[in-house]
Image: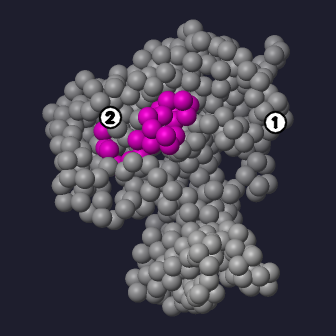
Amino acid sequence: MSIATAKRWGFVATPAVLAGLIWLSQLHGASLWAWICGGPAAILMVISGGGWLVVPGERRFLRFMSLAGLFGIIGSILGVLSWGFLVTVGLLFMSVAVAALSGWIAVDNHDAPSDLPQPKLTPVLALRAALDNIIVGVFVSVPKIIQGESEIKRVAEELDAALSVYDKNGWHDNPEALVEAPPPLESPEIRRRRLQGHDVEMLRFDSGYQPHPELPGGERWLSYTSNRDARAMVFRHDDDKPRPWLICIHGYQMGVPFLDLNLFEPKFLHEKLGCNLILPLLPLHGGRKLRMISGDGYLNGDAMDTFNAVRQSQWDIRRLVSWARSQGAEKIGALGYSLGGYNTALLSTLEELDLAIPVIPLTDIPDIFWFHGPRQILDATTDCGVSIDRVKQLMKPLSPLARDSKVDLDNRQIIAGLADEVIPPGHVQQLEDVWQTGRVSWFQGSHLVFKDIPSINRQIAELVSTKLAN
């Protein structure tokens, strides 16, 4: 797989600098309110555009440029009384253009395999990529990323201890020792609710997950008491007709019913396609979260916490699969988005599923963390021995890239965006290379905004109808 050379030309960011200077000219001698509305956008435009001019290829500047465009759009509208209607229109147009420019530069600078289809860059696609850049900034800056000398040292010591246990037990070559099958789920607590016009069964049960006793970090993981309570939403048809069951696995920082139901659309999957649905709540998300942000702790640079988060995700989901089978499920498939795509692909290596559809999937956790993570923190952790290669060794038993899928070749389908800034196409291609399906369905879209692309739902409908429903 050859990698196309990215076009890292600094001068393309010049319009962002000019836009920032024009913004500043409008703020000269203006009121405090005008500065509140326009100052952040103006400063970020100059800094991000200038940064890309000086260091083309440093993608953090593109996140700031996308954010500058968003601030400019909001600020130009809020400050309309300060500079008048015509100036507002001009500032608004420039801000949209800066956001689109950041997305265009980002997509044009993907280090993507040369044999992939090329994204057709349009203003709409560029703006969608800019939204991805903003989301990446949120993923990196809002959750509590491991930092500080004492925390990094603890992570390094735990990683050393864990890899020593791997060496002692031969787990590098025998990953099955770390993915034992959980006991079947027999009698979960079920309460019925009405959500967004649908009758939903709310399942709750004691996860029963235990960290591996020989690995470090287990006591800390068990101290996350809210995480022990596993949950899922179930949409089930009230008839005797045999129905396919679909495990729908949400993405990172989701796990909130409003978001999950808009992502998986029961009207489409449950009512139109006729599936019974199970929507698991991943560890550390939603009602299982540790802090204010859903998902905080799952992908925050703490190697052993991430290891246990993924391991418990599979434990809980596999218990739900066993419960579905006890309810008469004859055919079971899995559909997951982003982090849910990772768990879908991994689940397909552990369970005899009839269908696996990872969409915009995360494929390699260490890779993507080192791709997006704050550079100063990554440098500090690497200096302490927490390198990407060593974390890959730890995560290998739980990586869909290191395990054989149990799903028939024709019943696996990857769906991914050519302008995805969160999980760039080259990362997705790794899973396709392992699966060797030759059936990645690439769409002209990004990570955040893709549900309005008709081809995605059409393909999911075709797969469910031909592979799962028959």
Label 2 CA crowd tier, 10 Å (few <14, some 14–19, many 20+):
some
Mark found first going from the N terminus, 2 or 1: 2
**Nearest the camera: 104 or 401?**
104
Residue under numbered circle 2? 175
Residue at image point 57% right, 8% down: 187
Asked which colour scheme the image uses, the reply is: one colour
Give amino acid for label 1: Lys
Percent across and percent down for residue 340 are: 55, 41
Chain part drawn in magenta? 281-304
- Circle 1: element type: helix
Res 263 → quadrant: top right
Looking at the picture, tell me which residue is in the foreground, 141 or 452: 141
To which residue does mark 1 refer?
267
Magenta span includes 286: yes
For residue 464, above or below residue 101: above
The vertical placement of 306 against 362, above or below, is above
Let me know if residue 104 appears in the view.
no
Left or right: residue 9 versus residue 223 is right
Q: Could you tell me what secondary structure mostly forms the magenta stretch?
A: loop
